Amino acid sequence: MKVITNPKQSEWSELLKRPTKSIEEIENTVVEIFEDVKNNGNSAIIKYTQLFDECHLKSIEVSQEEINDAAKRVSNTLKSAIKIAKQNISKFHEAQKTKAIKVMTTKGVKCWQEKRPIQKIGLYIPGGTAPLFSTVLMLAIPAQIAGVKDIILCSPPNNKGKIPDEILYTAQLCRVTKILKVGGIQAIAGMTFGTSTIPKVYKIFGPGNQFVTVAKQLATKFDVAIDMPAGPSELMVVADDTAKSNYIASDLLSQAEHGPDSQVILISTSKSLINKVKQDIMEQLRFLPRKEIAQKAIENSKLIYVNSKEVALELVNEYAPEHIIICTGSNEFFTDNITNAGSVFIGNFTPESAGDYASGTNHTLPTNGHSKAYSGVNLDSFTKSITFQHITKEGLQNIGNTIEVMANAEGLEAHKNAVTIRMKDITKDN
Amino acid sequence: MKVITNPKQSEWSELLKRPTKSIEEIENTVVEIFEDVKNNGNSAIIKYTQLFDECHLKSIEVSQEEINDAAKRVSNTLKSAIKIAKQNISKFHEAQKTKAIKVMTTKGVKCWQEKRPIQKIGLYIPGGTAPLFSTVLMLAIPAQIAGVKDIILCSPPNNKGKIPDEILYTAQLCRVTKILKVGGIQAIAGMTFGTSTIPKVYKIFGPGNQFVTVAKQLATKFDVAIDMPAGPSELMVVADDTAKSNYIASDLLSQAEHGPDSQVILISTSKSLINKVKQDIMEQLRFLPRKEIAQKAIENSKLIYVNSKEVALELVNEYAPEHIIICTGSNEFFTDNITNAGSVFIGNFTPESAGDYASGTNHTLPTNGHSKAYSGVNLDSFTKSITFQHITKEGLQNIGNTIEVMANAEGLEAHKNAVTIRMKDITKDN
């Protein structure tokens, strides 16, 4: 933990810098695997699954029987928890539905905007030590509410050829259309090009390691959209003496346990709070099963003392955190004026983990400063807006001349002519 | 023009294929210029402006005096047309404003979503034979309505060091913050890294040639967002005997004049309409100033006869056109069931050029099949949604156990602990 006191504005950019990783070496591998999957489909998929997941699969599609068996093995306690979370996530994302926006911009000129679901999407759920079924909830629930037709899920199998029960159970609960035992670069390549088993999709969602991140970026070159660029998870906390130091410590640690590269920053106008948080972190760290991971992230964490809430706010907006907890005597000052953040958690009883699982908000959020320009995943991530217009004869008479003048000034005579040819008929008819 | 009759579904993918371009050669140039601008700022910018625009600039920023002079030279007729267009575009984009969405997902758990403006954006307006001031309207108007703070505009100077009067006038009218005489790759690089004159922005909007397209794609690697991937403009028309062939011909030509690589497709259930459109195109083409460009695009155009409106609809959704005109006896069937399109124009008196200039809808739209997953530019393109949550003691008691169970099942004990530590205090207090 580094304690920094009143950093000069000229030092902010260095202070708030995220560690950058060279991805160039990875890029070649990703390009190679994409090429192979594009040309050789399933046989390439099976080859890389053998290589990376150490598992030889006859069939990469999860059968209904496997799903049913998995569901039986999930405890009722966990099932209930998942259902409560699903209810809250559904409520919050249902509320994001919008109606068509219709405007008569000029008499006879009717314009409207409607959102329509993306027809085919792919969800990537990472493997690893823990089954990230919560991410299945966060992606499949809004997809289903938006009306997406085909929801494909790819997740790497373990060396016995299995995907965790919790993931299969949750995927079925959220009406995922097809589940595939494919992970890593080959999963993203499969959903980009399609194979005889993996459907080609229009947009890919979900987190992953740096290989998956680079693969998703490459997918965009082949005209597949992605949810957002990814990066290590982050938590910033702004707190003063109204905050409880042991709560803050627990939140910082919950972020730190994600991985050694997790970003953890506390900003405070209270030196005594900073000291107490420091002590509480050391205290709580001892009892964590993932303490080695958390310790590494905590070593790189920053506890920044600043003189005023105004400076704290500026630091927040400069950093553009993925998650931010606000626990101060003037919470509204912050919530009203934050311009860059993924998700904001307010007050002593709003831990960040609430948003990770069950409060209802989405946990797929922009990291690495991307909240300056990107939204977190929300209902609109699964739709696109289409505009429509209908112009009557009268409408064209009202705006026709404007179009003609502008098209002419841009040197586009055929654009002008498409109006002129119609206007002549209208004049003749009158 | 190729007339195709009842193509088999197995041939669709070939039939609807857009020409692909190799961008690898360009990529090296783009990477090199990015590196140079990153390291050498303005001096690199000025060097490439000399090289590509054949113009040596002392200052790359447009002065207020230049803007005032330019405004004096724009005719009153054009000024009025631009103002009418601005009014309609403003009305349509104002109507897209949304309120915060607030939901109590569980008693004591308040979640909300608010849209906040992106603070700094860059607009790229291409140079070339004609001044594309209409694109200034389409990007700067919604940016201003959304509340974007800094709106930077880059456009290449001619060899006399000037940006067209119409662009300067329109930029000032739409309250662009800063106008820079920089074009091409160096403009995108400048807005990506920032120089002593060009501000670094969070998101870059606007069309451009293939150099600009590749540069925008590269910018995303440096954490700058872009509006959408670009490609040659496209128009698909679905028409039957209720359509007027000379109107359809004029629309197809208005698309064709954009460039030799413009995509022009007519789908019809009427063979006689196809024949008449073919004749009308040849007739109208003769009188166009840009007929050589249009001719090339028309040579590659496709007129497709199909048996039924159902097949026509399937072709539309498979192609996912940027613009589509629907002129049939069953327009509603199409508008209700189109899933993939950028902007839809309905009926005999709704030429595509209306949406290019003055009806109110945006003309920055997804090409190259991207409308399967991307929206055209709209008010939301200039904002990001941020989620907020506030949980009371009671709220945490209601969902705390759910979070604990789920965090535990994902092996994230520190996530669980952030809840447990608070729950203990709440229980103690009660």
Image (spheres, coloured by chain):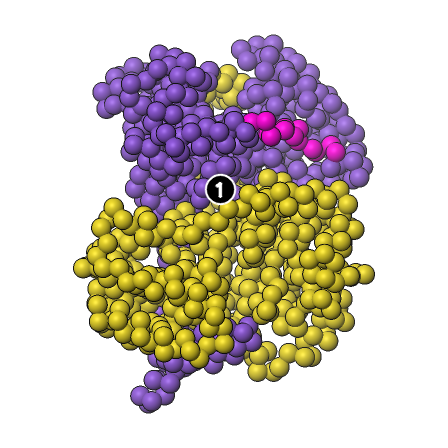
Chain colours: A yellow, B purple
- Identified at 76% across, 66% down, the residue is A63
Residue A90 can be seen in this image: yes
Residue B170 can be seen in this image: no
- Amino acid carrying mark 1 in the image: Lys
Count every numbered label the image shows and give the total: 1
Q: Is residue A157 left or right of residue A231?
A: right
Residue B101 covered by magenta stretch: no
Q: Is residue B179 left or right of residue B210?
A: left
Q: Position of residue B191 (x, y in %)?
A: 38, 34
Q: Nearer the viewer, residue B386 or B376?
A: B386
- Identified at 66% across, 58% down, the residue is A183
Q: Kindly indicate the quadrant of the structure image that contains residue B192.
A: top left
Q: Kindly indicate the quadrant of the structure image that contains residue A217.
A: top right
Identify the secondary structure beneath mark 1. Answer: helix
The C terminus of chain B lies in which quarter of the figure? Answer: bottom left
The segment highlighted magenta reads B14-26
Provide the residue designation for mark 1.
Answer: B221
Q: Position of residue B304 (x, y in %)?
A: 73, 29
Is residue B129 placed above or below A106 in the rendered structure?
above
Q: Residue furthest left?
A: A307
Q: Nearer the viewer, residue B158 or B84?
A: B158
Is residue A130 placed above or below B428 in the rendered structure?
above
